[in-house]
Amino acid sequence: MKPYCLILARKKSQRLKKKNLINFNRYPLIFWTLKNAFEAKIFSKIILSSDWDELLSFSKIYFKDVILHKRKKKLSNSKTSSEKVIINVIRDFKLKKDNY
C-alpha cells in the first residue's frame, strides 16, 4: 500500500509573505512541490492543506488529482505545530491508520 503525502502551506509565512505563489522558474513555488510529489509516484493520495483559498484554487487548476484541505483559521498561525494540522487532516478525512 502506498502512503499519503501531506503538504502544509500557510498563507502568512513569517519571512516571505505569500511565498507559495511567488514565481520561481515561471511557476509558483507550490507548483514545484506538487509536481515533484506527483512525479515521485510513491503516494496513493496527495493532500494539500492550506488556509489560503487562492493557493488551493491555483493548485487544483494544475493538479486535478490533488486533494484540497481548507485549514481552519485556528490552525493557521505561526504558533500552530505541524502535528496539530496533521491530526486535523487525519480526522477530517477519516484516514485509515495503515496509510499514513
Image (cartoon, grey):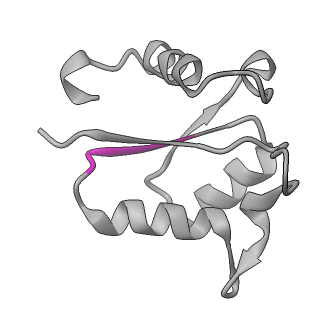
Image point (54%, 70%), residue name: 32
Image point (58%, 23%), residue name: 85
> Looking at the rendering, which quadrant does residue 8 occupy?
top right
**Quarter of the image containing the C terminus?**
top left
Q: In x, y percent, where is residue 80? A: 70, 21
Image point (70%, 86%), residue name: 26
Q: Is residue 90 one of those drawn in magenta?
A: no
**Front position in the image: 26 or 62:** 26
Is 14 situated above or below 63?
above
Is 44 situated above or below 34?
above
- The answer to whether 25 appears left or right of 82 in the picture is right
Q: Main secondary structure of the magenta part?
A: strand
- The answer to whether 57 appears left or right of 59 in the picture is right
Image point (18%, 43%), residue name: 2
**Quarter of the image containing the N terminus?**
top left
Q: In x, y percent, where is residue 73? A: 80, 22
What's the magenta region?
Answer: 43-48
Is 69 situated above or below 92?
below
> Looking at the rendering, which quadrant does residue 72 occupy?
top right
**Front position in the image: 35 or 76:** 76
